[in-house]
Amino acid sequence: MLDHGHNHYFFFVSLAIALMSGFTGLSLTQGASMMSVVRKKLVVSMSALALGSGIWSMHFVAMLGMTLPVPFHYNALITVASALVAILITGAALLLVHFGERTAHRIRLAGLCVGCGIIAMHYIGMAGIQDVKPVYSTVGVATAIFASLVLCVASFSISYGQRGSRNILFGTIVFGTTVVAVHFIAMAGTHFVEINGGVATGLWLSNEVLAFGVTITSFLISGAFLLMGVTFATSQEDFQAESHPVNKNYNQVEPTVREDALAVRVPYERNGQTHFVQSDEVAAVQAEGRYTVLYHQSGKLFCPWSLSVIESRLTAPCFLKVHRSYVINIDHVTGFERKKDNGFCSFEEQPYLSDVPVSRSYLKRVRLSLGI
C-alpha cells in the first residue's frame, strides 16, 4: 500500500469550484418553467454543462492536490468520459424537473440522478489513473454512495421545492458541499498500490497537462459564476430597464387603468412576445425568483415583474399578499380553511391553481377581507 495525502489549499479551491458551478447551474434555470420549449432546452443544457463540468473540475482539482510517493498519470479517454457521464446524468436530472409536472417525487428522483452522476464520475475518473491501482474498501464505497444520494436529494428538494433566491442559495451550499464531501469520503476509503512493469495504453495525461485543462474549465466556471451573480444581484427594476431599451422607464410608467374596474394591464411573455392581461382576470401571483407566475383561466403565465412590483402595481383592495411568495385576488377565492396558525385559500374555478398558503402574519387581514 502506498501512503497518500492531500494538499489543503487544493481542498478549498475544489470547494470554491463546486459552489460556483452549483450556483451557476441552479440559477441558470430560474424561471425556465415559463420559457418556450426551445429556450428551455438551451437553458437546461447550459445548466447541465455547468453542474457536470463543475463536478468533474472539483474532482480533478482535488486529485491534483493528492500526493503519492511514486509518479502517476491519467488515461485521456477515461478522463474525458468521466466528464461526459457527469454532464449527461446531470442533464437527465434537470429534464425531470423542467419538463413535465414538477412533483415532489420527480424532484427527489432528480436528486438521486445527480447523486448517481457524482458517484459515477468519481469512480470512472479514478479508473483512469495509470501506474498505480486504486483499491476500494466496501465501507468507503457504501458511505460515499449513501452520502451522495441523500445530500443530492436534499439539495434538489431545497432548490426546487420553491424556486426562490434564498432556496437557490441554500441549495447551492448543499450541492457544493455534497460534491466535495463525497469525493473525500470516497478517497478516505481508497488505497493505492504500485503497478510494477505495467505498460500504459492509449493517450495519457500527466498532472501538468491535466492541470492546464482543469484551469481552463475552472476559468470558464468562474466567468459564468460572475455573470450569473451579477444578474442574480441585479434588482428587478434594473433588469427590466435593460430588457426593454425602447422604453427605459418601463417600470416607472403609470399603470393603465380601466375606469370601470380599476384593472391594470399586466405583461406576460410567451414564445418571445410580450402580451397583456387585465389584473382583475388574475386569480393569484406566485414569485418565481426575480419573476412571477400569473394564474389565469387560460393557464400559468410568465410575468417579467417581480413580486414587489406586483404589490406596488396591483393596489386595488381585492389584491392581498398572503405569503412571502403569493399575492391573491380575493374576488377569485372560493374557499378558506384555517389550520392552527396558518390557513389556505382555495380557487375551485381555477384549473391551474391549487390551494394557496396563508402565513400567520397575513391571516387576520385575509379573514377580514373575506368577511369571516
Image: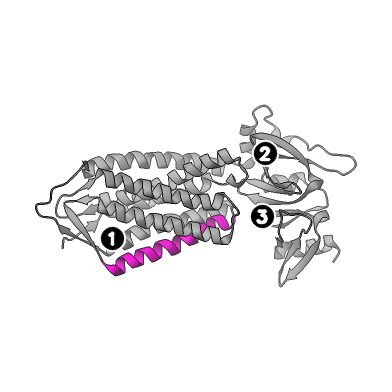
**SS class of the residue under badge 2?**
strand
Residue beneath label 3, please?
Answer: 325
- Number of the front mark, 3 or 1: 1
Q: CA distance from mark 3 to mark 2?
A: 20 Å
* Residue 275 percent location from the top left of the image: 72, 36
Q: Is residue 351 visible?
A: yes
Closer to viewer: mark 3 or mark 2:
2
Q: Residue at x 51, y 39 (%)?
A: 42
Q: Amino acid at mark 1?
A: Met
User: Which residue range is magenta in the image?
Assistant: 137-162
Q: Classify the position of the C terminus by image quarter.
A: bottom right
Residue 87 x, y percent position in the rendering: 41, 47
Return the mark for residue 187: 1
- Which tag is nearer the camera, tag 2 or tag 1? 2
3D distance between C-alphas at marks 3 and 1: 42 Å
Q: Nearer the viewer, residue 157 or 310?
A: 157
Say which mark, if any, is on residue 342.
none
State the CA–CA distance, disc 2 to disc 1.
Answer: 48 Å
Q: Splitting the image into 4 quarters, where does residue 277 fall?
A: top right
SS state under label 3: loop
Disc 1 element: helix
